[in-house]
């Protein structure tokens, strides 16, 4: 199931069963990506799965950004519906089940690394404690 976004206010927030029911804002691929990944919670869930591998609902709740239970459940449903993540055991409940990235979700890794690298360079003057990206080209803590 996917959550509808878009210009049609009646469709906003409505859960739909297929992507053909989503009221996309435009045909622009960036806008379309932001329709499903533009909220901070979706990207932080993807980040946690990239960094830590599979995670349970309870482990995702312990993220330092303190996502609320209702938002986490909604985002997990959205990301499963978009086939960016999947349940490790489809028969288990959300709370007792681990989630993992699909191949499509894992392809977001270089995008998140690039976004983090950009933040290190361009936000360090505003956020002195910003952490570094752990890649061969970045240290754990921004050194610039």
Image (spheres, rainbow, N blue to C red):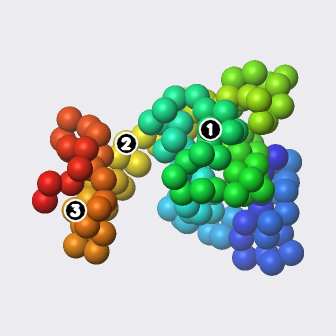
- How far apart, in angstroms, are the residues tagged by discs 1 and 2? 23 Å
- How far apart, in angstroms, are the residues tagged by discs 3 and 1? 30 Å
Residue that label 3 marks? 121
- Residue 59 disc label: 1
Expressed as whole percent of the image width and height from the top left, the position of residue 39 reads: 59, 63
- How far apart, in angstroms, are the residues tagged by discs 3 and 2? 17 Å
Q: Is residue 88 left or right of residue 95?
A: left
Nearer to the camera, 30 or 40? 40
Q: Are marks 3 and 2 in contact (CB under 8 Å)?
A: no
Rendered view: 135 above or below 20: above
Q: Is residue 123 left or right of residue 33?
A: left
Residue at x 20%, y 44% (from the top left corner): 139
Expressed as whole percent of the image width and height from the top left, the position of residue 126 reads: 28, 74
Residue that label 2 marks? 110
Expressed as whole percent of the image width and height from the top left, the position of residue 92 reads: 82, 25
Closer to the camera: disc 3 or disc 2?
3
Q: In terms of secondary structure, where does tag 3 sit? A: helix
């Amino acid at each position: 199931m996917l959550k509808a976004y878009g210009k049609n206010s009646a469709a906003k927030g409505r859960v739909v069963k297929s992507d053909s029911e989503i009221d996309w804002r435009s045909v622009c691929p960036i806008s379309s990506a932001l329709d499903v990944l533009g909220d901070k919670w979706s990207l932080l869930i993807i980040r946690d799965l990239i960094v830590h591998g599979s995670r349970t609902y309870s482990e995702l709740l312990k993220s330092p950004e303190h996502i609320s239970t209702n938002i986490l459940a909604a985002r997990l449903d959205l990301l499963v519906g978009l086939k960016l993540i999947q349940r490790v055991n489809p028969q288990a409940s959300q709370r007792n089940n681990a989630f993992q990235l699909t191949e499509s979700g894992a392809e977001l890794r270089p995008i998140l690394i690039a976004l983090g690298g950009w933040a290190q360079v361009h936000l360090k003057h505003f956020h002195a404690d910003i952490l570094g990206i752990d890649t061969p080209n970045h240290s754990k803590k921004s050194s610039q």
